[in-house]
Image: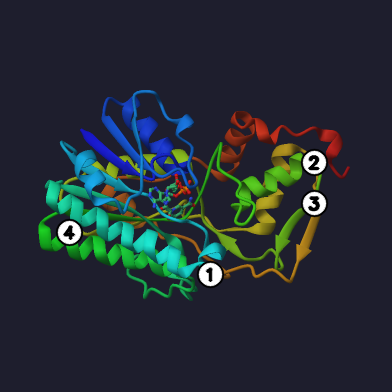
């Protein structure tokens, strides 16, 4: 098959692009490199630098493409609170531009990387796709708006759509932007530098961490499964992990204790978010294969930023 991946130089996009070319597919990537890095791409991936809102550029890139993965987005919750207009322009405007270009080019299917963040605070956990959405940040609203656009324009112009609501992805070589570093590489970096692990709130808030290879397998399945037009599917581990348990797991892997520093002044976000992944099993024949322990071990093996010497730990 021939794919276009928008945002394909980013953390998830590059892993997906490399997987697809390595399994015999043709892959083009469009990325403006505002956050991504094209140097991690397999040389067989055709890379184009540009903005996902550039419709004429999309027309050229979409020629002969069977399926589009739409990942290009601004991805930080705190940054979205500071710059909601920018988040709306890129995440919503970019989706509308892509869908109209796909209509013009006659592409058959789009897969949107949406987010578990769109659920917001939910009383009932694990959260299923049928939950009433309660987005609480401009980022979360922009992902939900993108879902609606993909479905509505898709239905109008007979473009099949599959929406994956992805939970907290982690894996080797994940970026660590200072303003919004994801918690797993942040903790590993703090441990590697011999510093304290800074936990927001009381550490009892929980998240669903899903390993990058499992996410790539779910994305790959979404392109080939038949009769799933307009499906919305959670992609998570299905496991509930508090920040305190995450630090316990890191300590177990390192074989030593780390220093924990609780910061009550920082908001810890929603109290609990864990995915109900039964629909993914049913529709995509997918389930996660890699445990948190296994995934963290893979990062420590593969990512030289986190080489940790035991002399740095609390004994
Ligand atoms: N990482 C996660 O835990 C997670 C969870 C849920 C959903 N998602 C979604 O998955 C997608 C990829 O996330 P990621 O973690 O790989 O983030 P990322 O920042 O590494 O990747 C996003 C990519 O989009 C590119 N981009 C941004 N604005 C662009 C524009 N205007 N035109 C073209 N390219 C642009 C960036 O340069 C970057 O390479 C995003 O849509 C995100 O909302 C990620």
The alpha-carbon separation of the residues under discs 2 and 1 comes to 37 Å
State if disc 4 and disc 3 touch (CB < 8 Å): no
Q: Nearer the viewer, mark 1 or mark 3?
A: 1
At 72% across and 67% down in the image, what residue appears?
202
Q: Hey, which quadrant is residue 95 in on the image?
A: bottom left
- Of the residues under marks 1 and 3, which one precedes in the sequence? 1
Q: Nearer the viewer, mark 3 or mark 4?
A: 4
Q: Nearer the viewer, mark 4 or mark 1?
A: 1
Q: Name the one closer to the observer, 33 or 67.
A: 33
The numbered dot on residue 173 is none
Q: Secondary structure at mark 3?
A: loop
Q: Note whether ligand 1 is within 8 Å of mark 4.
A: no
- Of the residues under marks 4 and 1, which one precedes in the sequence? 1
Report the residue marked by disc 3.
Answer: 196
Quadrant location of the C terminus in the rendered image: top right
The numbered dot on residue 256 is 2
Decide if residue 142 is on the left or right side of residue 120: left
At 49% across and 37% down in the image, what residue appears?
37
The alpha-carbon separation of the residues under discs 3 and 4 comes to 48 Å
The alpha-carbon separation of the residues under discs 1 and 3 comes to 27 Å
Quadrant location of the N terminus in the rendered image: top left
Report the residue marked by disc 4.
Answer: 154
Q: Nearer the viewer, mark 3 or mark 2?
A: 3
- Of the residues under marks 3 and 2, which one precedes in the sequence? 3
Q: Secondary structure at mark 2?
A: loop
Q: Hey, which quadrant is residue 21 in on the image?
A: top left
Q: Nearer the viewer, mark 4 or mark 2?
A: 4
- x and y, in percent, of residue 283 in the image: 26, 51
Report the residue marked by disc 1.
Answer: 81
Q: Residues within 10 Å of mark 2 (few under 14, many from 20)?
A: some
Q: Residues within 10 Å of mark 4 (few under 14, many from 20)?
A: many
């Amino acid at each position: 098959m021939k794919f276009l991946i928008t945002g394909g130089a980013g953390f998830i996009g590059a892993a997906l692009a490399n997987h697809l070319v390595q399994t015999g597919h043709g892959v083009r990537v469009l990325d403006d490199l505002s956050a991504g890095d094209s140097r991690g791409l397999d040389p067989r991936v055709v890379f184009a630098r540009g903005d996902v809102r550039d419709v004429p550029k999309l027309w050229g890139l979409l020629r002969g493409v069977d399926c589009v993965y739409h990942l290009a987005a601004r991805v930080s919750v705190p940054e979205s609170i500071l710059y909601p207009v920018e988040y709306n322009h890129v995440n919503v405007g970019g989706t509308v531009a892509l869908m109209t270009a796909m209509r013009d080019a006659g592409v058959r299917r789009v897969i949107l990387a949406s987010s578990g963040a769109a659920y917001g605070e939910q009383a009932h956990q694990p959260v299923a796709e049928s939950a009433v959405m309660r987005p609480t940040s401009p980022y979360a609203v922009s992902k939900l708006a993108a879902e609606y656009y993909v479905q509505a324009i898709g239905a109008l112009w007979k473009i099949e759509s599959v929406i994956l609501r992805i939970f907290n992805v982690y894996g080797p070589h994940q970026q660590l932007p200072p303003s919004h570093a994801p918690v797993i590489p942040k903790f590993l970096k703090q441990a590697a530098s011999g510093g304290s692990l800074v936990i927001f709130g009381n550490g009892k808030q929980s998240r669903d961490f899903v390993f990058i290879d499992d996410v790539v397998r779910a994305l790959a399945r979404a392109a080939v499964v038949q009769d799933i037009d307009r499906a919305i599917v959670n992609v998570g581990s299905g496991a509930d992990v508090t920040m305190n348990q995450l630090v316990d797991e890191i300590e177990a892997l390192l074989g030593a204790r780390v220093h924990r520093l609780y910061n009550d002044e920082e908001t810890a976000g929603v109290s609990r978010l864990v995915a109900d992944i039964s629909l993914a099993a049913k529709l995509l024949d997918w389930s996660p294969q890699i445990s948190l322990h296994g995934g963290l071990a893979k990062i420590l093996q593969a990512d030289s930023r986190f080489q940790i010497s035991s002399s740095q730990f609390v004994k």
